[in-house]
Image (cartoon, rainbow, N blue to C red):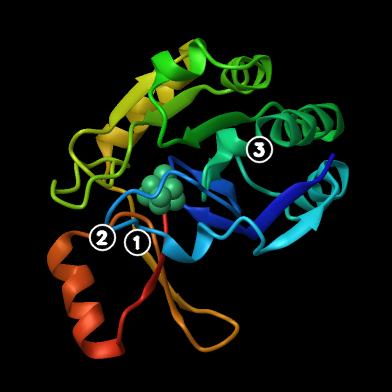
Amino acid sequence: MRLRLAHLTVTRHVNGPGDRLTLWVQGCGRGCPGCFNPELQDPAGGRLLAPAAVADRAVELLPWDGVTLSGGEPFDQAGALVAFLDRLRAAMPHRFDVVAFTGYLREELEAGPEDWKALLARVDLLVDGPFRADLPPRPPLRGSANQRLLALTPRGEELLTLARRSPMDVLVSLGPSGEVVVSGFPPPELLESLRRRLGRPSSAE
Ligand code: SF4
């Protein structure tokens, strides 16, 4: 089993509360109009890696408090992400929490294949629902107002409180080919200003 991965980063209060290791998985077949991360849709992009190797790299990147799964569509690679999280859980010196972004609804995941349910069982805070470019962002953590923030565990409730207490930051960086990468959920006016000044930025939720 392999995990198709686009990026692996550690950011502070950008992709969830605290210092978070964020996996942007590569590949998504949902095709939301106005997709936030079109460069992550290609199912042949990114790199194919063993989940255990990604977990070992995550341990090397300590310290961080929790893991965020984004993409692309994490639940399209649910089995590989379960293997990654279980390997990480076994290797880590402390407990960590999990935030996941998905274009599916929680109800679809609960009625889906076993590996979807297995991954959902490992998530504390879920941001669910398809991205809709015709709706405004909904802080915290939602790229469009239809998406839901769902605490699935007591730790998820704590994350929700932390996320609501202080606004998430936005990280703007240069990618390996000189492209501008925006991570987080910038207000539309900031994104528009970046587009005007720098050309169309790539986005990473
Ligand atoms: S689910 Fe996310 S990555 Fe997939 S098409 Fe929709 S916005 Fe893009």
Q: Is residue 181 visible?
A: yes
Q: Quadrant of the N terminus?
A: top right
CA separation, marks 3 and 2?
27 Å
How many residues crowd around disc 2 within 10 Å: few (fewer than 14), some, or many (20 or more)? many
Please, what is the three-letter code of the amino acid marked with disc 1? Val
Q: Mark 2 sits on what residue?
A: 186
Mark in the foreground, 3 or 2: 3
Q: Are marks 1 and 2 in contact (CB under 8 Å)?
A: yes
Going by the image, does 116 lie left or right of 56? left
Going by the image, does 156 lie left or right of 83? left
Going by the image, does 149 lie left or right of 8? left
The location of residue 193, given as percent across then percent down, is 17, 78
Residue 200 vertical placement versus 111 (above, below):
below
CA separation, marks 1 and 2?
6 Å
Chain-order first, disc 1 or disc 3: 3
Q: Mark 1 sits on what residue?
A: 170
The location of residue 145, given as percent across then percent down, is 18, 38
Quadrant housing residue 93: top right
Label 3: which secondary element: helix
Label 3 near ligand 1 (CB < 8 Å): no
Label 1: which secondary element: loop
Residue beneath the point at 63% across and 46% down? 64
Chain-order first, disc 1 or disc 2: 1
Q: Is residue 13 visible?
A: no
Please, what is the three-letter code of the amino acid marked with disc 2? Pro
Quadrant housing residue 76: top right
Q: Mark 3 sits on what residue?
A: 77
Please, what is the three-letter code of the amino acid marked with disc 3? Gln
Residue beneath the point at 62% across and 17% down? 113
How many residues crowd around disc 3 within 10 Å: few (fewer than 14), some, or many (20 or more)? many
